Image: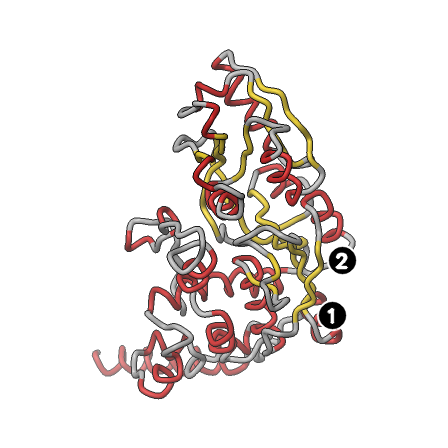
Amino acid sequence: MMGKIASVAAAALTSAALAVAAVPAAAQPKSPTIDAIKARGSFKCGVYENVPGLASLNDKGEWVGFDVSYCRAMAAAILGDATKVEFVKLSFAQGMPALRSAEIDMAALAITYTIQRDTELGFEFVGPTMFSGHGFMVHKRSGASKLADLNGATICIVAGTITESLIADYFRPRNMTFKPVAIETSAQIMPMYEQGRCDVVTLEPPFLAMRRSRLKDPGEHIILSELFAKSHMGPVIREGDAVFANVVRWVHFGLVTAEEMGISADNIDAVLRDTKDPEKRRFLGLEANIGSKMGLTDDFMVKVVKAVGNYGDIWETTYGMKSPGKLPRGINALARDGGLQWAPNWR
């Protein structure tokens, strides 16, 4: 009886094996966006012209910043060369139209993730690459120390953003009022604020801290500790190209995974040479052929990490202790360290 069961089981396994063998190998994934990027030989990335920490030119004329690093990471993954980026300078209001018309491949403009933008506008969000909230900075001479002190304040706001509606939603139920001063580009905010044309300026605290560091007298300006709204930010791409969306999404997850694994630009060659950890070997493209199944090279994350480091490296040099802002990671720390940044399993 046992022999009969064994024979039946063996026959079933053989049939299953033949069925699997008969299934054709998966076709190379097709992406019109990636095909266009490779044909062009560059990744077109929309960035702000001069927002310290996010995107700006250093004294050598080189693009630097948090979002700039993500642009370079995408070029490294898709083209194998992080220098093959065409940075397109855009205001916030120009970003989504430029993306819709395919003037750019990705808008790296710290766009806040909202249900309307995600479901109604034909765009897809990556990340969030940064978790934050909306806050206020005031002149020290104003005497304001909390949100309740801002009743009747004049507030500078970039036109086309959701900021004005967020402030209104917070102020109205508290019987508070404010006077919005619409500004065309984010680069105009601080000069107008410093000139006293508005009492208050509002941005996410990381951006406020970086901009305060560039004012004539940073000590004369206070960033209030209270936040009035959530802000989940990240790069944005067009909907309709699932293969490209997977690549962009997993480059972000890869940057986080590299930090989780302790892999950085400084040690990646040693890890490549020495590691026997199967998870790290999959991540580095030494096993499993994950990259080629995405339409990339298997070692695409090696190229990314060598170019820009891991997520923690990007944070520290743009907003953290190696930057003028010297901001703590806070909720952008890894989940294991009490933050919100984490990545799915690399398998």
Residue at the image point whose x is 49% and y is 30% from the top: 138
Q: Where is mark 2, residue-wise?
A: 102
* Amino acid at circle 1: Ala
Q: Nearer the viewer, residue 227 or 211?
A: 211
Taking the image as shown, residue 92 lies to the left or right of residue 323, namely right
Taking the image as shown, residue 102 lies to the left or right of residue 206, namely right
Q: Nearer the viewer, residue 184 or 78?
A: 184
- In space, the residues marked 2 and 1 are separated at their CA atoms by 10 Å
Taking the image as shown, residue 251 lies to the left or right of residue 46, namely left
The quadrant where residue 146 appears: top left
Question: Mark 2, residues whose alpha carbon is within 10 Å: few (<14), some, or many (≥20)?
Answer: some
Residues at marks 2 and 1 touching, judged by CB atoms closer than 8 Å: yes
Q: Is residue 228 above or below residue 30?
A: above
Q: Is residue 243 above or below residue 290?
A: above
Quarter that holds the N terminus: bottom left
Quarter that holds the C terminus: bottom left
* Amino acid at circle 2: Ala
Residue at the image point whose x is 49% and y is 33% from the top: 137
Residue at the image point whose x is 50% and y is 53% from the top: 127
The quadrant where residue 22 appears: bottom right
Q: Mark 2: which secondary structure?
A: loop
Question: Whole-percent x and y of residue 31?
Answer: 67, 67
Question: Whole-percent x and y of residue 336?
Answer: 28, 55
Q: Where is mark 1, residue-wise?
A: 36
Q: Earlier in the sequence, mark 2 or mark 1?
A: 1
Q: Quick check: can you spot residue 276?
A: yes
